[in-house]
Image: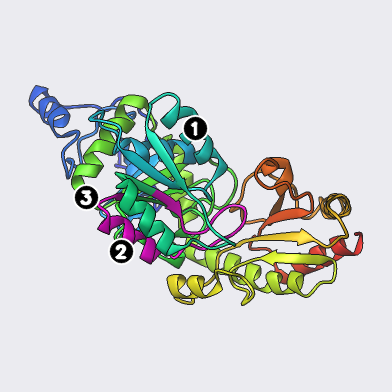
């Protein structure tokens, strides 16, 4: 019988739980090398440890984030857990500093896991009038001497852009390790590791995937010792992405740069439509000169774009009227722009801010838009139609 010579340009999906090892010597080498850097590229043991389909997707992310290693996990939250685990050694409980304007799930993880379950000493740094005061940060760093500093380049849902390069320098000067969540900015706009961050993470569910059909997370870095620590933790707690989701992620990453460029262009143009509309009171988008972080975003992202997230507040004489306006707007466009509690999808989605963050942001007229890659004329028409109903 003639041997099959068909070749595929897709990443094969290896659903094996365990892999064939040819002899005892190979088995010994495979287990010995499991935590080494670099690991033997052709030796696989068990898919909870490492899987070739997952490794192929990790290599694609390494190219995007310009890093020496990337480890995929089954969700953004597991990536957060993995990244933070790297620096938890049990050798004392030094101070850890988290910026306050970070993903709500991260804030809950800090309180319910890091503080309550693991006993870490956590401090938070908050902005003033929509910006982070670097002098106040330097003072806090010098007094706390934190082991770890954690922040996001673009905050959720208030879309603040941090002066990340300056923050990283101040944190490193104070002797801290820096973890940065780059989900909103993406590696299209900048690469934090090149500015001195120790660890960069993403909810790959969002823009890296971009199609709202998988959940995934990724942790990236350059230091081989940090990689070894992360591999060990992922192995023991089982934070491994499935090969099927890794295969889909590999395919979706092919269009990443094209998608993000369109996301950013649409958001920039839509922010101006909203800014000029009489039924909208405030638009939070760093591409607008009126935004407090506009100059910071221009410097940090080098003119590539300003991200794809817009938060805006409906006009109204009081909070009740604003809330009613927001509800009417959301209902009017629900067939075109659905209310979905996630972001980064190719299609535009929205979320009502108070419904999710009411305790922190009791603002019933505020809406967060995750701007997709829809044809802009169609997107603009939907938004204007919704505003007409208010």
Visible in this render: residue 53? no
Q: Nearer the viewer, residue 58 or 235?
A: 235
User: Separation of disc 3 and disc 1 at Cα?
Assistant: 28 Å
Q: Residue furthest right?
A: 389
User: Disc 2 marks which residue?
Assistant: 194
Assess whether mark 2 and mark 3 are in contact (beta carbons under 8 angstroms): no
Q: Nearer the viewer, mark 3 or mark 1?
A: 1
Residue 122 among magenta residues: no
Q: Residue 286: give x, y in percent of width and height.
A: 58, 69
- Identify the magenta region: 150-177
Q: Nearer the viewer, mark 2 or mark 1?
A: 1
Tell whether 269 sits left or right of 1. Answer: right
Label 2: few (<14), some or many (≥20) within 10 Å? Answer: few
Q: Quadrant of the C terminus?
A: bottom right
Marking on residue 223: 3
- Compared to residue 180, the image places residue 135 above or below, namely below
- Compared to residue 345, the image places residue 15 above or below, namely above
- Compared to residue 334, the image places residue 283 above or below, namely below
Residue 169 among magenta residues: yes
Tell whether 261 sits left or right of 379. Answer: left
Q: Disc 2 on helix, strand or loop?
A: helix
Name the residue at 69% across, 53% down: 349
Name the residue at 64% across, 60% down: 372
Q: Looking at the image, what colour scheme do you see?
A: rainbow
Q: Nearer the viewer, residue 167 or 74?
A: 167
Marking on residue 111: 1
> Quarter of the image holding residue 73?
top left
| Disc with the residue nearer the chain's start (2 vs 1) | 1
């Amino acid at each position: 019988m003639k041997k099959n010579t068909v070749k595929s340009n897709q990443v094969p999906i290896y659903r094996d739980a365990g892999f064939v090892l040819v002899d005892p010597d190979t088995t010994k080498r495979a287990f010995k090398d499991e935590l080494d850097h670099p690991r033997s590229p052709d030796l696989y043991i068990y898919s909870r440890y490492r899987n070739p389909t997952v490794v192929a997707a990790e290599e694609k992310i390494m190219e995007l984030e310009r890093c020496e290693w990337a480890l995929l996990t089954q969700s953004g939250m597991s990536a957060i857990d993995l990244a933070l685990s790297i620096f938890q050694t049990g050798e004392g409980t030094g101070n850890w500093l988290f910026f306050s304007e970070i993903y709500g799930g991260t804030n809950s993880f800090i309180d319910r896991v890091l503080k309550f379950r693991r006993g870490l000493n956590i401090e938070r740094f908050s902005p003033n009038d929509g910006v982070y005061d670097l002098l106040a940060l330097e003072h806090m760093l010098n007094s706390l001497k934190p082991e770890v500093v954690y922040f996001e380049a673009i905050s959720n849902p208030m879309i603040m852009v941090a002066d990340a390069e300056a923050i990283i320098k101040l944190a490193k000067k104070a002797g801290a390790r820096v973890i940065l969540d780059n989900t909103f900015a993406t590696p299209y706009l900048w690469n934090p590791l090149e500015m001195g961050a120790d660890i960069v993470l993403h909810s790959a569910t969002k823009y890296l995937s971009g199609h709202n059909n998988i959940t995934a997370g990724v942790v990236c870095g350059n230091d081989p010792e940090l990689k070894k620590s992360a591999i060990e933790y992922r192995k023991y707690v089982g934070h491994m992405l499935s090969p099927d989701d890794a295969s889909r992620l590999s395919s979706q990453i092919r269009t990443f740069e094209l998608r993000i460029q369109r996301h950013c262009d649409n958001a920039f143009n839509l922010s101006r439509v909203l800014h000029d509309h009489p039924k909208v009171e405030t638009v939070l988008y760093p591409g607008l000169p009126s935004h407090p972080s506009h100059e910071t975003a221009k410097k940090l992202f080098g003119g590539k774009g300003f991200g794809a997230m817009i938060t805006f507040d409906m006009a109204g004489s009081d909070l009740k009227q604003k809330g009613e306006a927001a509800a009417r707007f959301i209902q009017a466009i629900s067939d075109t722009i659905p209310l979905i509690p996630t972001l980064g999808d190719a299609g535009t989605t929205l979320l009502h801010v108070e419904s999710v963050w009411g305790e922190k942001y009791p603002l019933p007229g505020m809406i967060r838009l995750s701007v997709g890659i829809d044809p802009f004329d169609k997107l603009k028409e939907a938004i204007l139609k919704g505003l007409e109903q208010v």
